[in-house]
């Protein structure tokens, strides 16, 4: 049954399953006043192999407090299923939300997807899946891994241990094999920019200048989507903060919230 979390007046929340696997769940926060509202879908990071929606609770609450219906998604990890399981799960979670839009006061024609690090990759992959997803008005990535292939290449010679770890994580996401031979197809599927099309949603990506997921990750996405006449805004800020830590910088939080408001109100 829906509950009023922590006694917050006017908000309800529940955890629902959108599939049979234990990680195919999402937390839903909404205002049960009968008014359909735009939604924010949140996707956590964690190298595709770890992390959990519980670490996104504070951010989930902040968007619910701003009047959005919020879906905070878990998905099958790369230790449990190889790509494209993670994109499939995000799409299934969105489809489930649409089927039950009335229950959660959700305007299914008006939503954005926001992801952090590996979750940013999943969010961006949703954004370039097919030729546009109905109702999707924008995608936000905080330190998004736009190109696992570039992460694989860069990680081979990187001094940063996180960059080397990202290379290993990308291999695991692909099912444990390098981007050649029989695995070339799955690696191609993982490359967000290679699937750009004219009806894709606009995107906003944010990187720190010196983090291990560099702004250059988003440069190719901006180039490819520009060819399809889809706007991409790449924001770079000083420092090395990554994903959630980057988002919590006040200027970044405000920039993301403003961008989302411009897309869906």
Image: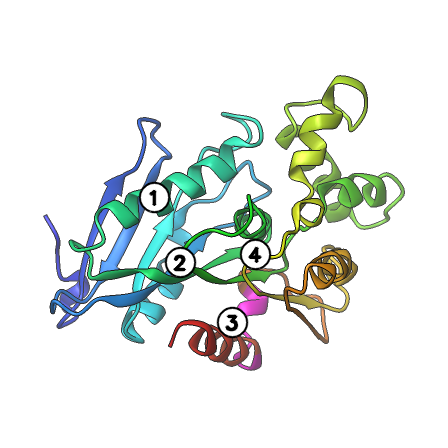
Looking at the rendered structure, the secondary structure element under dot 1 is: helix
In percent of width and height, residue 151 lies at 76, 44
Q: Earlier in the sequence, mark 4 or mark 1?
A: 1
Residue 194: image location, x then y, percent: 71, 45
Q: Please give the residue where the numbered disc 1 appears in the rendered image.
A: 95
Question: Which disc, if any, is residue 248?
Answer: 3
Rounded to the nearest whole Å, what is the CA distance between mark 1 and mark 2?
11 Å
Circle nearer the N terminus (4, 3): 4
Q: Quadrant of residue 219?
A: bottom right
Distance from label 3 to label 2 (Cα)?
27 Å
Q: Look at the image and give the residue range highlighted in magenta.
A: 245-251
Pointer 2: what residue?
135
State which quarter of the image contains the C terminus. Answer: bottom left
Q: Residue 82 sits in which quadrant?
A: top right
Residue at 14% across / 71% down in the picture? 10
Examine the residues drawn in magenta and state their main secondary structure.
helix
Give the percent coordinates (x, y) of residue 110. Answer: 36, 64
Mark 4 — residue?
A: 200
- Mark 1, other Cα within 10 Å: few <14 / some 14–19 / many ≥20: some
Q: Residue lying farthest top? A: 182
Is 248 within the magenta?
yes
């Amino acid at each position: 049954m829906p509950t009023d979390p922590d006694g917050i007046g006017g908000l309800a929340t529940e955890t629902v399953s959108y599939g049979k696997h234990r990680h195919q769940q999402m937390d839903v926060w909404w205002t049960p006043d009968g008014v359909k509202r735009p939604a924010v879908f949140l996707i956590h990071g964690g190298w595709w192999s770890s992390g959990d929606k519980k670490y996104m609770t504070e951010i989930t609450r902040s968007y619910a407090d701003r009047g959005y219906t919020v879906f905070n998604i878990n998905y099958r990890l790369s230790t449990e299923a190889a790509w494209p399981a993670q994109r499939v799960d995000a799409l299934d979670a969105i489809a489930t939300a649409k089927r039950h839009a009335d229950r959660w006061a959700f305007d299914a024609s008006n939503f954005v997807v926001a992801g952090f690090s590996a979750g940013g990759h999943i969010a961006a992959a949703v954004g370039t899946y097919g030729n546009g997803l109905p109702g999707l008005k924008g995608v936000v990535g905080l330190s998004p891994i736009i190109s696992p292939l570039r992460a694989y290449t860069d990680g081979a010679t990187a001094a940063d241990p996180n960059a080397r770890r990202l290379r290993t994580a990308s291999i695991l996401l692909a099912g444990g094999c390098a981007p050649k031979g029989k695995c070339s197809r799955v690696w191609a599927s993982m490359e967000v920019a290679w699937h750009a099309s004219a009806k894709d949603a606009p995107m906003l990506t944010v990187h720190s200048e010196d983090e291990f997921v560099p702004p250059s990750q988003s440069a190719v996405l901006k180039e490819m989507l520009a060819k399809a006449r889809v706007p991409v805004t790449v924001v770079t800020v000083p420092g090395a903060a990554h994903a959630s830590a980057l988002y919590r910088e006040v200027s970044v939080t405000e920039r993301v919230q403003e961008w989302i408001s411009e897309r869906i109100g």
